[in-house]
Amino acid sequence: MNKKFLVAIGIVSLSFIIWSLIPSDDKELLINSEKPETPQKVIFQVPNQPLPILSQTKSRFSAQTIAKLKILDEIFATKNDNDGRLDTEFNDISPELRQALIESYKAMPKERLNERGTVIFLLGKKLENESDLDFFQDVIAEAPCLSLTDCSTDSTVEIPGEAHLAEAQETTLIYPQLMSLRLISSSYVASENQVMKERMAEFFKLAQQSPSEYIAEEANRIIDESGIKVEL
Amino acid sequence: MPKHVNNIQSTIQFRPKVIKDIGSLNSKLGGPMRSILMLLSLTVSFNAFSALIFTPQVPAAVKQQVLDDLKLIGSVKALGTTPLHKQIFGDVSGVNYTKFFEARMNKVGMGCGAGNAVACVKPFQSNTTMFLTENYIKFSHPAIARLMVVFHEARHGEAQSGNWSHAICPTPFLDDNGKEIKSIWTGASLAGEDACDNSPFGSYGSSTIMLKNISKFCTNCNQKMKLDADIYAQDQLKRISNKTAKQQMVVDFQAKKR
């Protein structure tokens, strides 16, 4: 047999072998033409858009503050929670930047729970004044987010027998509040300022009274764990 | 694709053996047949070592987010591991997390029904396919929460372990303070639902252990990610309904760095 014939047999055999190795459902996909999917309506925008604060604040805040907000916006756009700049670029938050971050938080759609939690994380890095705690009290007093698609509406589709698929969702609904609880408790333990400690204890008392049972229970757990002295 | 998976550490043993066998056959045959068999071995090895396969239904944005998330977890470095983590995953490391995932899942598809699910597996259909939904990118979950879900579901792919089916949450289902554990947003009791684990090694248990270890020992995670890991681990711990199992995990989490 000549070489060309053998090569031809080899190519045909190889094609057959490759075809047989493809899983059957993928073969169907290759055979049948796919219609492009109609994009579903998204209730809030994926974070490719700038934070609302940036478009409104250019004339109000200094260049340094705007630069920090831009860093945060870049981090949100990449969805990279592990960006090292969250640990390095926001360690000395000026009063102006603090104000800008608070305004940014309030301007964000409530459904942007991770982004709101991230802003809380940054604001909680260094709590020096009693007024720094006002924002956190507002956070813990917020109306609960009722669903991940629309905080104002309980649009949960409950499917019998699929409670286990609710993993993570329940925690994310109150993620900003959980982040607040953790940060204030860390600050309480680290603080030597009695006035600040008393204010932080007040924060936890407010959390204990949350309409969300889960937030109240988590507050109780942290109070016990951290030895926070809450007045009865 | 056949896999050899055990409960302690999952590795893919199929691939090197196939290549070795083909190699020995190859040496006994002459010219053109050797070429064909070499091409065959490359084809098999390509399939065996191929990256995660995404079905055409997976939107580009979902695919990119999954790949980014897997790259994130695959980059984890750590100094320290708790004993339970070592049993399930090995040492805390991105390499081990990647191995764990790739030993169980080789394909990503779309569709988990009409609910709020982010990801699921359907053992009746495939033990090696992770199904996602648009919620994977629509919902504003922290990255660690998405990874927790993905690894939770990957654990369900272990057919030889009964897919680590969930335990029925007890009735009543009470927390450590004697209060009933309910779904946060529906307010419905979880008692009687198959939404608990009675072992540290199930899907809730293993993902909780993974997150706790990341929180404790990750050396290249920023503070937010470590805090997130602890927040979500604390929530998942509630789903361990067996008191002995839960206590075993609590003790495990107190392990110091090695």
Image: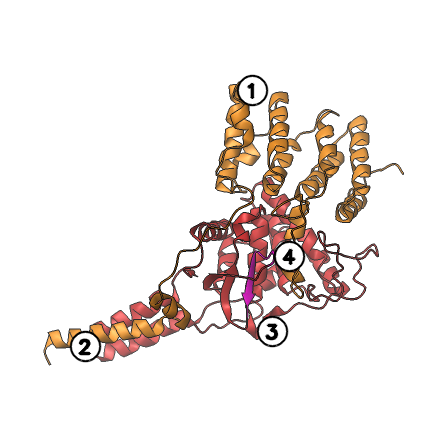
Q: Which mark is residue A9?
A: 2
Q: Which residue is mark 3?
A: B162
Q: Amino acid at mark 1?
A: Phe
Q: Which tag is nearer the camera, tag 4 or tag 1?
A: 4
Q: Chain of mark 3?
A: B
Distance (Cα) linking label 4 and label 3: 28 Å
Q: Chain of mark 4?
A: A
**Observer-nearest residue: B91 or A89?**
A89
Q: Colour of chain A?
A: orange
Q: Which tag is nearer the camera, tag 4 or tag 3?
A: 4
Q: Which mark is residue A157?
A: 4
Asked if the residues shown at circle 4 and circle 3 are in contact, with their CB atoms under 8 angstroms apart, the answer is no
Q: Secondary structure at mark 4?
A: loop
- Who's the residue at 78% across and 33% down the image? A200
Distance (Cα) linking label 3 and label 2: 45 Å
Which percent across, then down, holds residue B37? 25, 74
Q: Is residue A214 left or right of residue A229?
A: left
Mark before the other along the chain sequence, 2 or 4: 2
Q: Chain of mark 1?
A: A
Q: Magenta region: which residues?
A: B115-123
Q: Are marks 4 and 3 on the same chain?
A: no
**Observer-nearest residue: A43 or A81?**
A43
Q: Secondary structure at mark 3?
A: helix
Q: Which residue is mark 1?
A: A61
Q: Chain of mark 2?
A: A
Q: Residue A89: in sight, yes or no?
A: no
Distance (Cα) linking label 2 and label 1: 73 Å
Image chain in red: B
